[in-house]
């Protein structure tokens, strides 16, 4: 991943995500780095590759062909890659209607992406028009009535409560910054709120493989699969998580496009100190407060440490990295 010159550093640092620096990823797609979270928006393998591997492929969009409406929630829209790639893939099914909602704190990532010619060239005119409408009006409505979308700006914890009641999402795309840096959006309470919004058979997709996150999703009543790496990404023991609300009429196979079952090592991970969740009952706690409470709970829990877990599975982890 390459950082551009300071001319591509986007101030002011007081904005929600701090200073944003433009980055080129391995597949040539634009990404950004946030100084507030000290993280890039995407892996170095490629922003577009990551969107397709971790969100589009495991969504298994062919299952929506001919069913009418697909309802999607994009948490932390960022530059818009995940939803744009999803829309492009859905267009292959013609008459499939899309109802889309997005949650995002900072307006700049989408603005900066749409100002980049390379980013704009990735998308078909209808998808690009929707992204531009989200930037300019915060919503879109296609003239043919097949798709509509609304972007809610602000803290996702409070904006989640402003989504239409009674809507069951078929897909939730969860792409917040890492749990250690942005625990507010990975708390047990927030993840439960997302899980409760899933329709039967609905899927939550995320790059996170953290035991704390997976444990919260299991306690929210979801079943899990382990995501496979994006093309060009280093092979690791997991590259993310597919969590789904069970549906007797639409079972999720053990293996599928972009996923596999959790290994014995991954199940064991859920019994360690790492699985202690992030907690935010009020929905207003600061990141520091959430992290501090979790550290205290970990110190008192009596569960084995992550280092002990790693030692138990060291040879297996090494084999996964080869």
Image (spheres, rainbow, N blue to C red):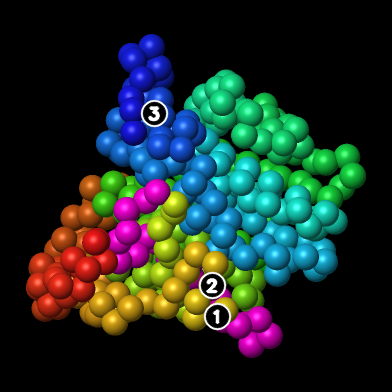
Structural crowding at the residue carrying mark 3, measured as other residues with C-alpha within 10 Å and reported as few (<14), some (14–19) or many (≥20):
many
The CA distance from mark 2 to mark 3 is: 32 Å
- Is 55 situated left or right of 10 in this image? right
- Is 53 situated left or right of 297 in this image? right
Helix, strand or loop status at disc 3: strand
In the rendering, at what x and y percent does residue 194 appear? Answer: 52, 63
**Mark whose residue sits in front, 2 or 3:** 2
Q: Give whichever of 33, 139 is nearer the camera.
A: 33
Residue for badge 3: 23
On screen, 226 above or below 126? Answer: below
- Residue sitting farthest toward the top: 7
On screen, 61 above or below 74? Answer: below
Q: Could you tell me what secondary structure mostly forms the magenta stretch?
A: loop
The CA distance from mark 1 to mark 2 is: 6 Å
Q: Check residue 256 in the rendering and tell me which mark sits there, or answer none.
A: 2
In the rendering, at what x and y percent does residue 169 appear? Answer: 64, 63
Instruction: Name the residue located 76 percent from the left edge and 37 percent from the top edge.
Output: 126
Residue for badge 1: 253
Instruction: Name the residue located 72 percent from the left edge and 36 percent from the top edge.
Output: 124
In the rendering, at what x and y percent does residue 1 appear? Answer: 34, 33
In the rendering, at what x and y percent does residue 93 appear? Answer: 78, 57
Helix, strand or loop status at disc 2: loop
Q: Give whichever of 194, 23 is nearer the camera.
A: 23
The C terminus - image quarter: bottom left
């Amino acid at each position: 991943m390459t950082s551009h010159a300071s001319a591509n550093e986007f101030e002011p640092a007081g904005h929600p995500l701090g200073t944003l620096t433009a980055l080129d990823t391995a597949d040539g797609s634009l990404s950004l780095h946030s100084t507030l979270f000290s993280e890039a928006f995407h892996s170095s393998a490629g922003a577009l590759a990551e969107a397709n591997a971790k969100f589009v492929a495991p969504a298994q969009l062919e299952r929506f062909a001919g069913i009418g409406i697909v309802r999607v929630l994009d948490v932390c829209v960022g530059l818009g890659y995940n939803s744009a790639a999803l829309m492009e893939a859905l267009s292959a099914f013609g008459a499939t209607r899309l109802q889309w909602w997005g949650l995002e704190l900072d307006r700049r990532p989408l603005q900066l992406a749409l100002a980049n010619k390379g980013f704009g060239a990735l998308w078909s005119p209808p998808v690009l028009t929707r992204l531009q409408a989200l930037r300019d009006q915060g919503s879109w409505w296609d003239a043919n009535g097949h798709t509509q979308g609304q972007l809610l700006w602000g803290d996702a914890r409070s904006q989640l409560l402003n989504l239409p009641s009674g809507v069951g999402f078929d897909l939730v795309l969860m792409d917040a910054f890492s749990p250690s840096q942005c625990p507010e959006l990975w708390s047990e309470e927030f993840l439960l709120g997302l899980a409760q919004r899933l329709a039967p058979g609905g899927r939550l997709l995320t790059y996170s493989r953290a035991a704390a996150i997976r444990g919260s999703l299991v306690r929210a009543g979801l079943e899990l699969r382990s995501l496979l790496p994006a093309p060009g990404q280093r092979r690791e023991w997991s590259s993310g998580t597919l969590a789904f609300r069970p549906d007797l009429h639409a079972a999720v196979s053990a293996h599928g496009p972009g996923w596999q079952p959790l290994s014995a090592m991954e199940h064991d991970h859920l019994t360690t100190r790492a699985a202690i969740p992030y907690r935010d009952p009020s929905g207003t706690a600061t990141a520091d407060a959430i992290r501090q409470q979790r550290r205290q709970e970990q110190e008192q829990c009596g569960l084995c440490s992550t280092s002990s877990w790693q030692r138990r599975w060291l040879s297996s982890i090494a084999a996964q990295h080869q």
